[in-house]
Amino acid sequence: MITSIFSKSKPINFIMVAVFVVILFVFSNFNQLFTDVNTSLKTTLKLAIAVFFIFLLDFIISKNNLTKKNGYAIMTFGLLFGLFPEVLRYSDLLFANLFVLFALRRLISLQTNLHTKKKFFDAGFWIMMATLFYFWAILFFAVVIVALIYHSKNNLKNVIIPFVGVATVILLLIAYNIIVYDTYIKPTNFSRYASVDYSVYNSGEFILKFTVLFTSFIWTLIYFFRSIQDKNKKLKPSFFLIAWSSVIAILIAIIAPVKNGSEFIFLFAPFSIIMANYIEVVSEKWFKEVFISLLIIVPIVSLLL
């Protein structure tokens, strides 16, 4: 039933997912929404970004033909917010993920072979912007390298351009710091902390969530890599970029300094696309429903643990 509702791309799908995210956000940020004016405005901005993610993800998918015309990706995206509502509390992570999505949008659109240099510049620029908000987002620069391998094997200029985008952000940061703080780089500009302490995951709630998440992710990712071989030659690099983005997102979560579920935000978009590609080809309707039902039931059950 759930997959039937989202089997076609309709405006009602956006409304349903957006309302779901708004409800989650209100529960996660209730105190911040109703305090002083400044805090309320900052919290409202976080909400706007979270809802904007839905439309941005759908735009990236539809513009680049990453799935068939359905709402499975935004449905999965919304359900992942339900699985890890903690991501809605951290503005730095929301901004970082926003800029990473901007970068991925430009890299995926390289399949058109138009404005290649500008797209590589934008990708480097946006990933560096994301790094200012969350340092380990810099690992997504590896996806830029993969894109260069696919799209610029014999063009040295294109190899340099993403680094120009990175340098542009650094120069703007230095200029800002000089004007405002009378220094070149502040220690807080790049908080390079990491952690491999996973003791916080040793609870029934996290064990249940991770079991469902990683089982679903590994199962669909294996299928995704296999299915790439059958994709249109022009689209193959884009699908590889999505797959490698999901791997980078897992790596970031592994070394994240704060481990409370919010560290998985970078996985939401690539995993949603991977899951959508899987759901739309599965013939057994009950099997699709089981996948989605697990993402709905687990957050509810985890609250009782």
Image (cartoon, helix red, strand yellow):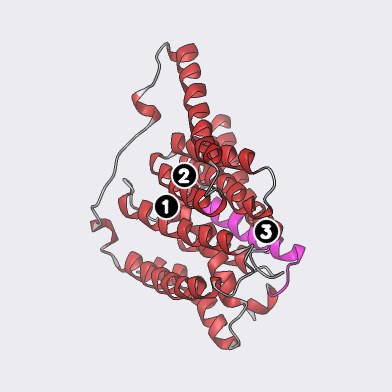
Judge from the rendering whether residue 276 lies leftward or rightward of residue 187; answer left or right. Answer: right
Frontmost of labels 1 and 3 is: 3
- The residue at which mark 2 appears reads as 93
Placement of 147 over or under 193, stated as above or below: below
Mark 1 or mark 3: which comes first in sequence? 3
Q: Secondary structure beneath disc 2?
A: helix
Residue displayed at 57% across by 87% down: 286
Residue at the front extreme? 154
Q: Nearer the viewer, residue 226 or 86?
A: 226
Q: Amino acid at mark 2?
A: Leu
Mark 1 to mark 2 CA distance (whole Å): 8 Å
Placement of 47 over or under 241, stated as above or below: above
Mark 3 or mark 2: which comes first in sequence? 3
Q: Position of residue 192 (x, y in %)?
A: 32, 37
Q: Amino acid at mark 1?
A: Ser
- Which disc is residue 64 wearing? 3
Q: Position of residue 152 (x, y in %)?
A: 55, 48
- Which disc is residue 262 wearing? 1
Residue displayed at 46% across by 44% down: 93
What's drawn in magenta, residue-wise?
7-27
Q: Amino acid at mark 3?
A: Asn
Q: Residues within 10 Å of mark 3 (few under 14, many from 20)?
A: some
Q: Nearer the viewer, residue 147 or 89?
A: 147
Magenta region includes residue 11: yes
Frontmost of labels 3 and 2 is: 3
Is disc 1 in contact with disc 2, using a CB cutoff of under 8 Å? Answer: yes
- Which disc is residue 137 wearing? none
